[in-house]
Image (spheres, grey):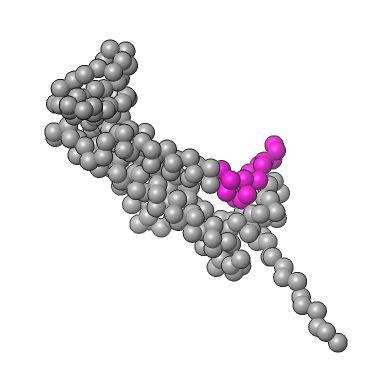
C-alpha cells in the first residue's frame, strides 16, 4: 500500500492571530524566503552606499568647491535605486502587512528590540548626518544642472541664475555651482538612504526572527 506524503503545514506565529492583524496569504512566505532576504540585503547595501556617497561628496566640497561625483553622474543611479528599492519596499509591505481596511495594523512578528549598542550607533549616525546637512546648508545649496561643451565651455542652469536659462560661466564658477548642487542633494539623499536602510533592516530582522522559530521556505 503506497504511503501518502503528509502535506507540509505552515505554522502561523501566535502574533498573527491577534485581532486586527491584516496579514495576507503571502506574509509568511515573504518573511521566510531566502531569496527575498537576499533582495532585502541588496537594497539595504544600495541604500547605505547612497547615504555614504552623498554625505562624503558634500564634505569634500566644503574646502575648495570640488566634488568627487558630479550631480549629473550621481543622478541616474539615485533614480534607479530609488525606483526599484521603493517599489520593492511597497510590494513587500503589502505582502507582509496587507491592507488595513480600517483595522489596526499589527506587525506579524515582533523582532527583539535593538541592543543598547545599536541604539547608540543609530543616535551617532543621526547626529553626524544632522551636522553634515547643517554644514551643507550653511555653505550654500541649490538645485539645477551643469554641462561642459567643447572648448571647454562651462554652462549651468539654475533658478538662481538667469531663471534656469543655460548660462556660460567660468571654470571656478562652474565648480562652485556643482558644489552647491551636490550639497543640495546632500540634504535629501541621506534622508532617503536612511529611510530605505531602516525599512530593509526591519524586514531582515523580521526574517531572522521567523527563521529562528519556523524555519526557511
54 left or right of 200 in image: left
Instruction: Examine the rendering and report whether any part of residue 211 can be seen.
Output: yes
Q: Please state which of residues 123 and 31 is positioned toward the viewer in this rendering.
A: 31
Where residue 98 sits in the image (x, y, percent)?
65, 45
- Residue at figure coordinates x 28%, y 12% from the top left: 162
Q: Quadrant of the C terminus?
A: bottom right
Asked if the magenta segment contains residue 208, the reply would be: no
Where residue 9 sits in the image (x, y, percent)?
72, 68
User: In which quadrant of the rendered view does residue 103 lie?
Assistant: top right
Q: Please state which of residues 93 and 68 is positioned toward the viewer in this rendering.
A: 68
124 left or right of 61 in image: right
21 left or right of 64 in image: right
Where residue 111 sits in the image (x, y, percent)?
52, 57
Asked if the magenta segment contains residue 102, the reply would be: yes
- Residue at figure coordinates x 59%, y 69% from the top left: 215
Q: Quadrant of the N terminus?
A: bottom right
The region drawn magenta spans 90-107
Q: Please state which of residues 34 and 73 is positioned toward the viewer in this rendering.
A: 73
- Residue at figure coordinates x 49%, y 54% from the top left: 40
User: In which quadrant of the rendered view does residue 207 lie?
Assistant: bottom right
Instruction: Examine the rendering and report whether any part of residue 159 can be seen.
Output: no
Residue at the top extreme of this rendering: 162
Residue at the right extreme of this rendering: 1
Residue at the front extreme of this rendering: 150
Q: Is residue 45 above or below residue 169?
A: below
Q: Is residue 118 above or below residue 212?
A: above
Amino acid at each position: 500500500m503506497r504511503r501518502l506524503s503528509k502535506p507540509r503545514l505552515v505554522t502561523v506565529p501566535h502574533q498573527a492571530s491577534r485581532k486586527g492583524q491584516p496579514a495576507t496569504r503571502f506574509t509568511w512566505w515573504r518573511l521566510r524566503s531566502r531569496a527575498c532576504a537576499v533582495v532585502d540585503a541588496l537594497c539595504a547595501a544600495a541604500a547605505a552606499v547612497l547615504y555614504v556617497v552623498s554625505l562624503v561628496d558634500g564634505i569634500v566640497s566644503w574646502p575648495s568647491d570640488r566634488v568627487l561625483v558630479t550631480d549629473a553622474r550621481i543622478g541616474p543611479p539615485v533614480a534607479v535605486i530609488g525606483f526599484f528599492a521603493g517599489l520593492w519596499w511597497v510590494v513587500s509591505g503589502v505582502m507582509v502587512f496587507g491592507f488595513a481596511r480600517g483595522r489596526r495594523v499589527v506587525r506579524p512578528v515582533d523582532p527583539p528590540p535593538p541592543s543598547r549598542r545599536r541604539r547608540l550607533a543609530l543616535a551617532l549616525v543621526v547626529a553626524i548626518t544632522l551636522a553634515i546637512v547643517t554644514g551643507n546648508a550653511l555653505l550654500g545649496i541649490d538645485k539645477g544642472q551643469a554641462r561642459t561643451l567643447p572648448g571647454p565651455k562651462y554652462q549651468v542652469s539654475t533658478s538662481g541664475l538667469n531663471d534656469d536659462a543655460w548660462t556660460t560661466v567660468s571654470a571656478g564658477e562652474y565648480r562652485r555651482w556643482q558644489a552647491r548642487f551636490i550639497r543640495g542633494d546632500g540634504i535629501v539623499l541621506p534622508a532617503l538612504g536612511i529611510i530605505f536602510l531602516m525599512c530593509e533592516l526591519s524586514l531582515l530582522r523580521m526574517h531572522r526572527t521567523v527563521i529562528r522559530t519556523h524555519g526557511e521556505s
